[in-house]
Image (spheres, rainbow, N blue to C red):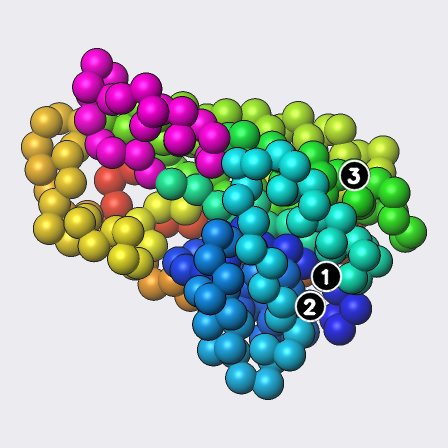
Amino acid sequence: MTDKIALVTGASSGIGKACASALLQDGWHVVFVGRRADALRDAIAANGEAAARGVAMPCDVTDPAAVKALFDAVQQRFGRLDLLFNNAGISPRATTPDDLRIDEWHQGVAINLNGAFYCLSNAFRLMRAQSPQGGRIINNGSISAHTPRPGSIAYTATKHAVSGLTKTASLDGRPFDIAVGQIDIGNVASDMTEKMVKGVPQADGSLRPEPRMDMQAVVDTFLAMARLPLTANVLFTTVMATKMPFVGRG
């Protein structure tokens, strides 16, 4: 595994940090990508001896020129890219469509959709040209890519769109041995989901606390996808807290 190169966006915290660190521990060379160089370096340093295989490359994924420069730097440094975890994303303020500001909508689209496309397209460019050809791209979707929450129109719309990226890119990648899949995650324990312990709005108008799962469940699912040979692909997988209100009526 020491010759495998991965790039993870949103790698300074949360799911991105956990999965990028797991790849390091699994023997990969990992490019940690995020806005803040210091946070990326701290995330890498927490991995002990494995940190030697990590590199911090700050980048604003909403800037197409910066993303191209990022992938060019990866190509120059490592010669290839075997895995992209397209993870960077935000959850705009929860509110009704009439109350959501246009700048909030644009920010959600810029990061969750445009940024995902910029990274995916540049990964395609590298993976298609390298020898041996091919690689794997895993998009971080969400349970909201299937079923929305009240007050989440920007987040839900962008995550539905990410599913479109995944489906189409999985077809476009076939001639070049580029496998594209998506991991949809529900209620992992993190700073972002602390509010779910206190209670979040439900489809029936009530406010209820929701169960969360440990981050390790996400990491294990992600690694199962990342370790597959390019002859196999998990197109979509959902990992969720067992008792969260996702499947059913509400």
Q: In the figure, 91 relative to 150: above or below?
A: below
Which residue has dot 1 on it?
A: 5
Label 2, label 1: how far apart the Cα atoms are:
5 Å
Say what amino acid the circle numbered 1 marks: Ile
- In the picture, measured across the screen, residue 250 lies left or right of residue 39, that is left
Q: Quadrant of the N terminus?
A: bottom right
Q: Position of residue 240 (x, y in %)?
A: 36, 49
Q: Name the residue rendered at 27%, 57% in the picture.
A: 191
Q: Residue furthest top?
A: 98
Which residues are the magenta region?
91-112
Q: Residue furthest right?
A: 131
Q: On residue 125, which mark appears?
A: 3
Q: Residue furthest left?
A: 206
Toward the viewer: 210 or 26?
Answer: 26
Toward the viewer: 36 or 110?
Answer: 36
Label 2, label 3: how far apart the Cα atoms are:
20 Å
Q: Name the residue rendered at 69%, 53% in the picture.
A: 83
Label 2: how many residues lie within 10 Å, few (<14), some (14-19) or many (20+)? many
CB of mark 2 within 8 Å of CB of mark 3?
no
CB of mark 2 within 8 Å of CB of mark 1?
yes
Q: State the image quarter where residue 15 is shown.
A: bottom left
- In the picture, measured across the screen, residue 189 lies left or right of residue 196, that is right
Q: In the figure, 6 relative to 48: above or below?
A: above
- Element on which disc 3 rests: helix
Whether residue 95 appears in magenta in the rendering, the answer is: yes
Which residue has dot 2 on it?
A: 29
Q: Is residue 150 visible?
A: no
Say what amino acid the circle numbered 2 marks: His
Q: Residue furthest bottom?
A: 49
CB of mark 3 within 8 Å of CB of mark 1?
no
Q: Name the residue rendered at 50%, 25% in the picture.
A: 161
Toward the viewer: 54 or 64?
Answer: 64
